[in-house]
Each structure stands twice: as structure tokens, then as C-alpha cells.
Amino acid sequence: MIACIGAFDGFHKGHQRLFLEAQDMAERIGDSWCAVTFIPHPQRFFKGDSFKLLFSYDERILLAKYLKIPDLVELPFDKIAHMEPEEFLAFLNDDFGIDGIVVGEDFRFGRNRKGNLTMLQEECKTMGWHCSALPHLIIDGEPVSSSRIRELLLEGQSEMAEVLLGYPFMIKSRVTRGKGRGRLLGFPTANLKIPAEKMIPKRGVYCAAARVNRRWWAGALNIGLNPTFEKEDKNMSVEIHLPDLEGELYGHDVAVFLIKRLRDEKAFPSPQALTEQVKKDIEECCRRYEEWASASSVFMKEWAAILEEAPSLG
């Protein structure tokens, strides 16, 4: 087994290059390969809720299917966090029968991150394993990293985040009951429950594509505090309006992909002024969705097949 090892928050383009290397190595020696990662994410283990992931653990499983990873192995990090580097490698070999390892050049492993690339290469040579360590992928003069993507999303740069990820930022959520103000304004919204471990992009209005009830929909996604109505509410809400959908979505699962951030969230002088702006937002969302869909037929087909396995999302 060829093991491609990393924390893998996001499966971005840098990670995808590691996966291709693992696949090529496996094909050269007539072997299989897998992606080995950790649950919880090491940063979540040490920092707790203060560290937010790009994607929830459930979303990561879906992304692994999209990227055609043959086997996603999620090791319990609390079990291995205190292993010495040699002990960790022996643990991997006992469980998977390692023939080769693929990592990034900054890979660290074992208790207190004592294991480095030099140690890994020496251990692989001793064990007779193939070993490949790739340098960072550089885009626009900077390394591609989950941290960089997280910063872009917190700045509202969802399109640049998509460039680094290789796919649009995704939110998979169960629809929960909200306060119902959207329905009173004539624009019913589905309130999305975001997993505790997942980061939330910058507040504002986004054009989005949503998969629910076995079809795709244009969506206007709002992330924010509803300042027109909630002067003191500090609880962030994430809600989406699907203009062409009729019926109740409460209790359904929905997969949402960000296409473009349209504007900041702001307080309007009246509900009527908010209503007029929302109409304009929806028109722009529908227009941009049609442009995106015409160029994304393969992406939409692939994700429809993946989500087909979850009946409420298919």
C-alpha cells in the first residue's frame, strides 16, 4: 500500500498533486494507494474550537469521492499524538503493510513533531519503502495552503479560494428552522446549520449553486447578523433563498457551492428598502448561476452522482 499522509484540510490543489504522485507510484510498482489523514484534525486536537476547518469531516468524505481517492483512512489523532516517530511508522506498517509513502516537503510526524523529512527518508530506506516528498505548489507567487485559503474566504475572496482549491467552497448542511423573516418579506430562506468545526466565510451576500431534491438550483446565500432587524444579535446565520423552489425544506440536507460574493451585508433603513435590494440580488444570482452552470456541466454531473448516495441530497 502507498500511503499519502497529511492533515488534508480542504484537499486543495497542493494536496491533489500529492494524490497524483501516490497514484503514479502505485501504478509503477503494481500497488494500491490511500490517503491517510487524522480525526480530529491535529490543530483541532491542540487548539479546540478556536481552530476552524475549511470542511467538516462529513464534507471531507464527499470531497474524497469527488477527487476519486480510492481509500480515505482517518486515524484517531488522540491515539497517535503521543507516539514517537518510529512508533508511528511501525503503527502504519502493522495496519496497512506500507510499501511507499508520499508527503509534502514540510511533513512532520510523531510526538512534538520530532519526525522530519530527513528522518522519514532514512526510515523508508531502512524499511525498503518508496518515499516521495513534493515541494509546495506555488500559485500567484505564494504556496497553496489551507491557511491561505481560509484567509481568502475570511476576506470574502471566494473566487480566488476556488482557484486554490480546484473547486468551489462547499457547505453541506441540514436545513433547520429560522425566524421566518424571509418568508414574510416574500423570499423564504432555508436556514443552514453549520458544523461546529467548520469555518464560515466573510459576511455578505453570495451567488450560489445548491443541490437539493435531486436537482440543481440557483441560490442567493446570506451570511451575517441580519442588521436590518437584529440590532444586537451576535449569532451568525447562514441562509439561502432558492428562487425557483416551492415547498418546505425543513429537515432536508442541502449542498451549497459558492460561486461569487456579491456584496457586504448592511443595515437597510426599512424592510421595503431591504426587499428592493434582495430582488436585485436574486436577479444577479440567477444570471451568474446560469453562466456558471453552462461552464460547469461536468462538475454538476459528477456531484449529482456523488450526492445520489445521500437520498435527501441526490
Image (cartoon, rainbow, N blue to C red):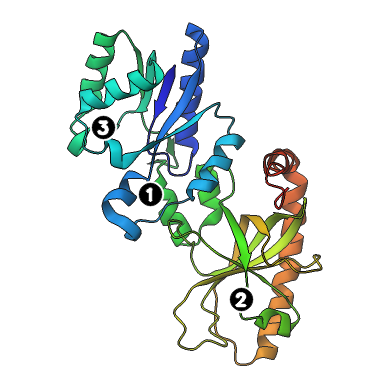
Q: Amino acid at mark 3?
A: Phe
228 above or below 8?
below
For the image, the number of numbered tags is 3
Q: Secondary structure under badge 3?
A: loop
Mark 3 or mark 1, which is nearer to you?
Answer: 3
Q: Secondary structure under badge 2?
A: loop
Of the numbered discs 2 and 3, the one sitting upstream in the chain is: 3
| Along the viewing direction, whichever of 294 and 182 lies nearer the viewer | 182
Report how far apart the C-alphas of labels 3 and 1 lie in the structure.
19 Å
The residue singled out by tag 1 in the image is 147
Dot 1: within a 10 Å radius of its alpha carbon, few (fewer than 14), some, or many (20 or more) residues? few
Residue 13 at x, y = what percent?
49, 36
Q: Amino acid at mark 2?
A: Gly
Report how far apart the C-alphas of labels 2 and 3 lie in the structure.
44 Å
Q: Residue at x 36, y 27 (%)?
A: 103
Q: Residue furthest bottom?
A: 270
134 above or below 1?
below
Q: Can you tell which quarter of the image residue 188 is in?
A: bottom right
Q: Residue at x 26, y 17 (%)?
A: 121
177 above or below 31?
below
Q: Quadrant of the N terminus?
A: top left
- Compared across the picture, whether 45 is left or right of 248 comes to left
The residue singled out by tag 3 in the image is 109
| Along the viewing direction, whichever of 60 and 216 lies nearer the viewer | 60
